[in-house]
């Protein structure tokens, strides 16, 4: 359906059929939050919310013409000379072009229309989906010969350098490498990965979207990253055995606690706790112990809220509601934080009751409609 809308718009704007149509999904992450940039393991999957891009080379001149259908907004830039814009969304596309050029590829000018059903600001990585979709599409039409991993790395660098968020690799990896009905266990240190069948019969994965995106998100994200880097640099300088957060014990952190601000120590404690939880969680998942897995999700939320301080009132409210309702097996905030969604594992027979309860409680508390999504796990970025 969305394909047809995008196709129609492309023809209307450019008078021809596009050369390629690409789909690129958003992601969930079951557990392993804020540890992709701390050498941990994460457990994401690509979902049935995606953007569609229609694209063709612009064989006329040096101009790239873009149209974001969801925002009804257009933008053009010269391939030979462009810079970051206040308009926001074009930066994800120009960032990819910029990184391709830096890596020695020579993209030519192109026309692109895109849009889809990934809610923006919901923590489902709509930006990574755009970046990976654009890198994938340019690779198709200009035959750069990029591997999937190249696409991931170029897209991540686009976000780091051009957009200016110092994100880790999880979102771009999940969007590009996703596999239907599987979660990816990604080792963010070595980039080795393994697909885990995600067939938890009788359960739904339900996202509750707070509908808020607190503006301090990006800057706080970069601050968290710096705090983590400060603590690990000190630990490495003191202990030869420590090469990354994976080698750090609670005792190591106690030994440096007087040398760093309390908050930095809290961040480091969260990171080592979360790295351990992901190990435990994958063991539980392979034994099909969903109850145990869910308990770890609750713990992750508490760590993100109290030690890492990336939650917000709305997210805490939804997670508390999930616990108090007795209807939810596991619940936590997901993604970067300061808004976006909670991810919930719910027995199918409880899904509807919980959604109704959550919607009315959210309305009473915040006077806002709560959006919810029951998600399915789909393949990563591909040609349509
Ligand atoms: C954002 C970033 C990811 C990751 C998550 C938190 O989604 O883009 O790299 O750090 O936050 O786990």
Image (cartoon, rainbow, N blue to C red):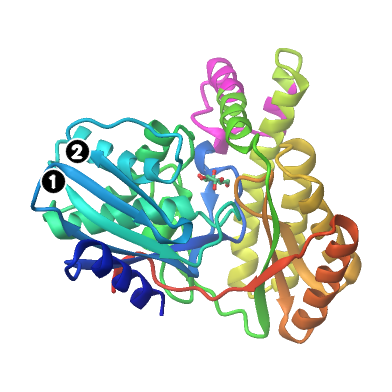
User: Is residue 231 part of the magenta span, yes or no?
Assistant: yes
Between 40 and 313, which is closer to the camera in this rendering? 313
- Going 21% across and 67% down the picture, which residue do you hit? 20
Q: To which residue does mark 1 refer?
A: 108
Between 341 and 309, which is closer to the camera in this rendering? 341
Secondary element at tag 1: loop
Q: Is residue 108 left or right of residue 347?
A: left
176 shown above or below 158: below
Tell me if mark 1 has few (under 14), some (14-19) or many (20+) residues whose alpha carbon lies within 10 angstroms of its own.
some
Label annotation for residue 36? none
Between 298 and 123, which is closer to the camera in this rendering? 123
Q: Quadrant of residue 142?
A: bottom left
362 shown above or below 246: below
Q: Is residue 344 visible?
A: yes
Q: In the image, which residues are magenta?
A: 230-254
User: Is residue 39 part of the magenta span, yes or no?
Assistant: no
Q: To which residue does mark 2 refer?
A: 79
306 shown above or below 26: above
- Identity of the residue furthest to the top in this view: 259
Tell which quarter ligand 1 is in. top right
Question: Do callouts 2 and 1 mark residues in contact (Cβ within 8 Å)?
Answer: yes
Between 219 and 103, which is closer to the camera in this rendering? 219
Q: Is residue 130 left or right of residue 200?
A: left
x and y, in percent, of residue 37 in the image: 51, 38
Q: How many marks?
A: 2
């Amino acid at each position: 359906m969305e394909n047809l809308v995008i196709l129609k718009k492309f023809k209307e704007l450019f008078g021809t059929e596009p050369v390629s149509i690409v789909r690129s999904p958003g992601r969930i992450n079951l557990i392993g939050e804020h540890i992709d940039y701390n050498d941990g393991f994460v457990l994401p999957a690509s979902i049935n919310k995606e953007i569609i891009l229609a694209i063709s080379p612009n064989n006329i001149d040096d101009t790239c013409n873009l149209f974001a259908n969801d925002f009804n907004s257009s933008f053009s830039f010269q391939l030979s000379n462009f810079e970051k814009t206040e308009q926001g969304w074009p930066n994800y596309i120009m960032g990819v072009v910029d990184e391709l050029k830096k890596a020695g590829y020579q993209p030519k000018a192109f026309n692109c229309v895109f849009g889809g059903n990934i809610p923006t600001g919901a923590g489902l990585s709509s930006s990574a989906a755009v970046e990976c979709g654009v890198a994938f599409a340019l690779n198709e039409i200009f035959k750069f010969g990029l591997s999937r991993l190249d696409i991931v790395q170029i897209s991540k660098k686009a976000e780091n350098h051009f957009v200016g968020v110092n994100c880790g690799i999880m979102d771009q990896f999940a969007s590009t490498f996703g596999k239907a009905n599987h979660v990816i266990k990604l080792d963010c240190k070595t980039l080795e990965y393994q697909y885990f069948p995600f067939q938890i019969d009788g359960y739904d994965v339900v996202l509750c979207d707070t509908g808020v995106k607190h503006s301090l998100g990006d800057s706080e994200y970069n601050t968290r990253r710096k705090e983590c880097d400060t603590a690990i640099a000190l630990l490495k300088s003191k202990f030869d055995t420590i090469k990354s957060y994976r080698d750090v014990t609670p005792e190591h952190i106690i030994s440096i606690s007087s040398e760093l601000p309390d908050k930095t120590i809290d961040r480091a404690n969260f990171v080592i706790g979360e790295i351990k939880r992901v190990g435990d969680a994958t063991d539980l998942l392979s034994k099909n112990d969903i109850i145990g897995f869910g308990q770890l999700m609750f713990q992750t939320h508490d760590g993100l809220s109290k030690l890492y301080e990336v939650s917000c009132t709305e997210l805490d409210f939804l997670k508390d509601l999930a616990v108090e309702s007795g209807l939810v097996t596991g619940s936590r905030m997901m993604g970067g934080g300061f808004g976006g969604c909670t991810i919930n594992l719910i027995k199918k027979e409880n899904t509807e009751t919980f959604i109704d309860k959550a919607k009315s409680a959210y309305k009473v508390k915040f006077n806002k409609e709560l959006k919810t999504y029951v998600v399915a796990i789909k393949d990563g970025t591909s040609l349509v």
